[in-house]
Amino acid sequence: MTRQYKIAVIPGDGIGKEVMPEGIRVLEAAAKAYGFTLELEWHDFACCEYYAEHGQMMPDDWKERIGAVDAIYFGAVGWPDTVPDHVSLWGSLIQFRREYDQYVNLRPVRLMPGVPCPLANRKPGDIDMMIVRENTEGEYSAIGGISFPGTAREVVMQETVMTRFGTDRILRYAFDLAQKRPKQHLTSATKSNGIAITMPWWDGRVEEMAASYPEVRTDKYHIDILAAQFVMNPDRFDTVVASNLFGDILSDLGPACTGTIGIAPCGNINPDRSVPSLFEPVHGSAPDIAGKGIANPVGQIWCGAMMLEHFGEQDAADAVVRAIEATLAQAPLRTRDLGGSANTEECGKAVAERVA
Ligand code: ATP
Ligand code: MG
């Protein structure tokens, strides 16, 4: 039986429209080489262009229009000068995350050949980790309020909400991932020396979960030291699991340490394949370079590889990552942000040709 995957393709705004065709080009090359087929459904909503015409980011029946798909392949959203971020993000990505309960935010952080590393004396292979961020609860609850607003007695409170269900499922995902990776090493981000209730409890959940994964070497770092260690000794880490806030910080710091805004990928994942997960590059719509055909397509392509891995097409996913590495290793095939001269399409074609 042929393996077939149905994908909702949402290019979005700005350079999203330019890098998406390259992502698709590479996915199609992988499908051909590895014997599966793709059914692609392109959508023009979940972007500011749609908002400008319709006054909302998505049609009311967006869920029906997306229908039963295996994944959403997303470009970028945002017209920062005209549509406030809270409108564009809440009206698109956050709707998907909530509706499909995409509770894992996964970011591979890897130093690639040809990418200048801001950390001294690091070479490809030295930095290779997975950051697993809890994506639905924790510090980002909207529970709280302001008492005596505007007076000298003003008191502001906001609660962190962690559930056993929400914490255990992200920890289980992270331990499963750590167990599959060669180093079998998991680091938990904590702050139990300063945050007196939630973080000691988080540590306890990690310890209990660790008992079921005896092969995985487990350690924990306070978030402040962990941030410093990301910069000083990034080779110490393999799989890193963190709450929503700590994960948010680490998943920007990690890619920054590998110099990769244009190439970093991201998955918003619900491991239960009955609902779609969403794969998108970390970068935004980059209005400053949009329309010029010079955007780096590697972030879009790499998150396509994550999507293939999510489908269980591990060999195809590995082939795409190898093709990215082989392309970046050659200066003329890199885009300008990496000091090369290739345009978006040339770089995308180079990766597609190398998928074998
Ligand atoms: P958002 O808020 O939507 O996440 P942002 O405003 O933080 O995004 P980006 O839109 O990612 O930022 O752009 C930040 C800078 O990085 C810009 O100067 C942009 O041109 C550059 N940049 C982003 N993505 C790419 C890319 N794929 N190729 C080349 N340059 C890029
Ligand atoms: Mg922005």
Image (cartoon, rainbow, N blue to C red):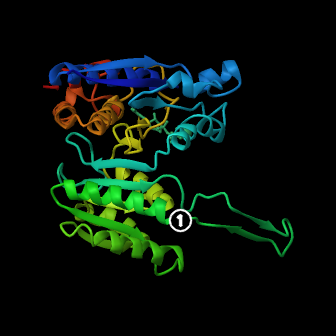
The amino acid type of the residue labelled 1 equals Met
Say whether residue 142 is left or right of residue 215.
right
**Residue in the image at 53% along x and 29% along y:** 287
Give the quadrant of ligand 2.
Answer: top right
Say whether residue 226 is left or right of residue 349.
right
x and y percent of residue 120 in the render? 25, 57
* Quadrant location, the C terminus: top left
Q: Name the residue tied to disc 1.
A: 162
Return the residue nearer the eye: 266 or 228: 266
x and y percent of residue 317 in the render? 22, 35
**Residue in the image at 62% along x and 35% along y:** 91
* Quadrant location, the N terminus: top left
Say whether residue 157 is left or right of residue 185.
right
x and y percent of residue 74 in the render? 44, 30
Instruction: Examine the rendered structure and indicate whether residue 22 appears above or below residue 79.
Output: above
As drawn, the residue found furthest toward the front would be 1
Q: Is residue 92 visible?
A: yes
**Residue in the image at 29% along x and 60% along y:** 175
Q: Which image quarter: residue 265?
A: top left
Instruction: Examine the rendered structure and indicate whether residue 130 appears above or below residue 16.
Output: below
x and y percent of residue 47 in the render? 57, 27
Pointer 1 local density, CA inside 10 Å: few below 14, some 14–19, many at least 20: many
Return the residue nearer the eye: 96 or 13: 96
